[in-house]
Image (cartoon, rainbow, N blue to C red):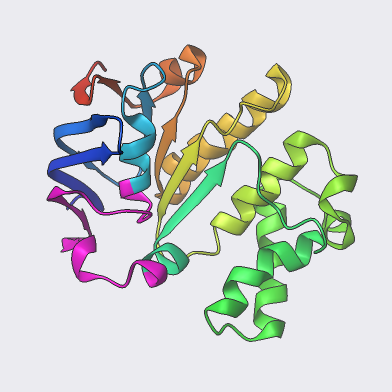
Amino acid sequence: MAILEIKNAEFTYRSRYQTVHALRGINCSFETGRFYALVGSSGSGKSTLLSLMAGLAVPDTGEVLFEGVSTTKMNLTDYRLRKASVIYQSFRLLPLLTVRENITFPMELRGVKGKIARKTAAELIRKVNLPDTVLNRFPVMLSGGEQQRVAIARAMTMDSHLMLADEPTGNLDSENSEKVIDLLLSLAHDEGYCVIVVTHDMEIAARADEVLRMKDGLLEKVK
C-alpha cells in the first residue's frame, strides 16, 4: 500500500485582487523504497502540492491520505510532528542550539526521554556520514553541506518513513549537492523511506525512480 496518496485534490488561492487555481484535480501515489522528483516551473503548483503533503494545509476538495487516513481527519500539528518530515533549502536549523540539540529537539517534543534522544542523535549523525565531533558544534560552525546532512538526521527522528524535500540542494555547491542526493537515494533504497524532492535540478530528476511534472496546476508522470 502507498504511504501517501493524493486523490482529486484541488486548491485555490483567493485574494481581493485575483483567484489562482494552484491545483486542479491532482491524483498520484507514493510508495516507500522509492525516490521521487517533482519538477515544474515557478508557479506551476509544486510548492502547493508539497504543502498539502506536509500537512501545512488541506485541499479545498479531494484529500491527502497518509497510510490510508485522510489528513482532514488528523490533528495536523501532530501529523507534522510525527509523520511528515520536511527538509528545506535553507536548512532551518535553530542557530542557538547545538547540532545534538537540533536533532533531539523534535524527539523531546514527542516525549522521548533525554538520554534516549541523545543516543539516537549520535546514531543518526553517523548515518548521515558526519563525525561525532559535530554534535557539540553550532550550525554556524558547519558548512552548508554539513548543515543539510544535520537537517536530514533531524528528519530521520520522525515516527514514519515519509521524507519531503524542498530544493534541498539549492544552497549547495555541486560536490555537496551530490553527497546530499546520494544520502537521500540511500535512505529510499536501503532504509525504505519514501523520498519526495521538489527540484529545478534536472540532474537530480535524472537519478529519481519516478519524475512528476507540474504545469498550470496539473500533474503528469514523465518517468
Q: Nearer the viewer, residue 184 or 213?
A: 213
Left or right of residue 201: residue 39 = left
Indicate whether residue 61 is drawn in magenta: yes
Where is residue 137? Give x, y as percent. 88, 57
Q: Position of residue 157 (x, y in %)?
A: 55, 64
**215 w.r.t. 104: above or below:** above
Q: Residue at x 61, y 79 (%)?
A: 108
Residue 73, percent from left and from top: 19, 69
Above or below, 194 relative to 137: above
- In which image quadrant can residue 119 be found? bottom right
Q: Give the extent of the magenta segment.
A: 52-78
Please name whichever residue, 62 or 7, is drawn nearer the observer in this view of the structure.
62
**Is 103 left, or right, of 34 in this rendering?**
right
Quarter holding the C terminus is top left
Lateral position of residue 57 relative to residue 121, left or right: left
Residue shown at the point (71%, 84%) measured from the top left: 115
Q: Residue furthest front?
A: 16
Q: Is residue 195 magenta?
A: no
